[in-house]
Amino acid sequence: MQRDNLAVTQVAGHLLDKPPVVSPDSTNYQVLEVFTSHEGLANLPVVRDGQPLGIINRNHFMSMLARPFHREIFGRKPCTAFMDTNPLVVDYHLPLTELSFEALQRGGKVLSDGFIITVDGAYAGVGQGVSLMQALADQQAEKHRQMMDSIHYASVIQQSFLQSSRRDMAACLQDYFMVWEPRDVVGGDYYYFVKRDDGFFVAVIDCTGHGVPGAFMTLIMASALKQVLGSHDLHDPAALLGAINRQVKESLGQLADHERHPELQVEVRSDDGMDCAFCWYDYASHTLTFAGAKTPIFVLPPKGDEVEVVDGNKKGVGYVSTPLDYQWDNRQVKLKPGSRLYISTDGIIDQIGGAKRICFGKKRFKEHIIKHAHLPMAQQQQGLLDAFHQWQGENSRRDDVSLFGVHIKETRA
Amino acid sequence: MQNLHIPATTYSPQVDFDFSRHQLSLRGESYPENASVFFAPIMAALDAYLAPLDHVRISVDVQLAYFNSASTKAILAVFERLNDAAVAGNYVTVNWHSDPDDDTIMEFGQEIAEDNPALDVHLLELV
């Protein structure tokens, strides 16, 4: 984090303005003269021997003087008559944030009357309410910019983790799409694809959370997946899920009480993991082996007119409530050439929208798959996303969105 | 025991636990940035309420539109506690309200009914 940024270190003194001042002995006629000759002057500080005594607000002063006989009565009297004797007085070095809290405590007054700035107790000048607001707005914008810069860079890192999958997908599949849209630039959705001579492996993953914590989880899961793939068979997705579950639960200490070493006390307990679909497609047998953690897959047979939903198991991977030795099930699905397979995280299915502001839901998702089924996958992607965006309408995006679709072609040699 | 009332925000549901009348309700959406911070005091209050109960009729009304995965876990935990209370000898009715076109929320209600057999769950369609 850079520390030399002006907006972050701003103090009250940066708002310093040096308007004309009057002494408490000046008459109201003299004050009137000052206001008349300085048209833009909203507030006139009253200072004696370098000590601030108060502020005369133009509007208040003018309205007082306009009252019947007030000009005659008060004209030659000292200007302290219409002076605010208790303005906000702050030191030059008071940080802006503290200044804003002090200003708020005074109610609306500081916005119209401004405040007095001193150096070592001596009058230095005034600050205007509007410049305080401007400075706070600038500070806010600057902090937001810094945060977004940081998140945009995090996104570069996160996307670099997807590169090998993107490359393998493009090399292996002829007719497919992969949508990956984090809600907040970075996110908790992730996908993994690897091509082999006898088939391909695809995983679509929804880690707990979104934004920065979600992105952390994708990196943890990516590394767990990589390790597990080194020691386990890619052809057995259920075994991969079981191995990742053990690894994540142990490395993050997400164990149930009876799974935990009795002497091991942890103060902060995380409970994060992933919902996902893991699939292996075998070219020779045209068979998809699917293991799912709270994530279904959607299958449309060649020339079919109904989308089949294949559910996974109901446990997520890595969570405290998932047993350490939990076993997921492999489900075999025939995917003859011409079949289409779709996998989505819950970001699409659960998005709020439509006239009744309810979830998009699996039923509508399936209807839109059927509606666009005759098209090449790239156009299906557009059709599905258009339908989704139309459903979302004015509602904010609730979660990260990932959607994979593939049209299975004749097996390549 | 003090009733628990938390007004709804854009990101969190309205929580209305009227312990004195044994009527609990959850309404709205749930996707707070930190779900465990939001749900921890709710779970604590629920635990304290349920602990001494015996042979009490508890009525729970739920009408949720959206909840993220972290909230889902917390909501499932709420029903697990209620199921435990039912097993312990109380009678817990859950009225699960969902729009007839909202298969996601309806399925979640079915899941809760299947996972917590001691609860008397009624899946009701909003009109």
Image (cartoon, grey):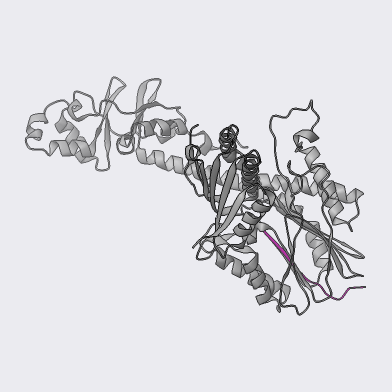
**The quarter of the displayed image where residue A85 is located:** top left
The region drawn magenta spans A400-413
**Observer-nearest residue: B73 or B93?**
B93
User: In the rendered view, would you say A55 is above or below A156?
Assistant: above
**The quarter of the displayed image where residue A352 is located:** bottom right
Q: Residue at x 60, y 33 (%)?
A: B51
**Observer-nearest residue: A394 or A335?**
A335
| Residue A357 in view | yes
| Residue A192 in view | no
- From the top left corner, tell me how far across and down residue B45 is, in percent: 56, 35
- Quadrant containing the C terminus of chain A is bottom right
Count of labels shown?
A: 0
Q: Is residue A367 left or right of residue A168?
A: left
Q: Is residue A83 left or right of residue A141?
A: left
Q: Residue at x 80, y 76 (%)?
A: A338
- From the top left corner, tell me how far across and down residue B109 is, in percent: 62, 55
**Observer-nearest residue: A101 or A91?**
A101
- From the top left corner, tell me how far across and down residue B73 is, in percent: 66, 46
- Quadrant containing the N terminus of chain A is top right
Q: Is residue B82 left or right of residue A114?
A: right
- From the top left corner, tell me how far across and down residue A57 is, in percent: 24, 35
**The quarter of the displayed image where residue B34 is located:** top right
Q: Residue at x 63, y 40 (%)?
A: B81
Residue A230 part of the magenta-drawn span: no
Q: Residue at x 75, y 37 (%)?
A: A256
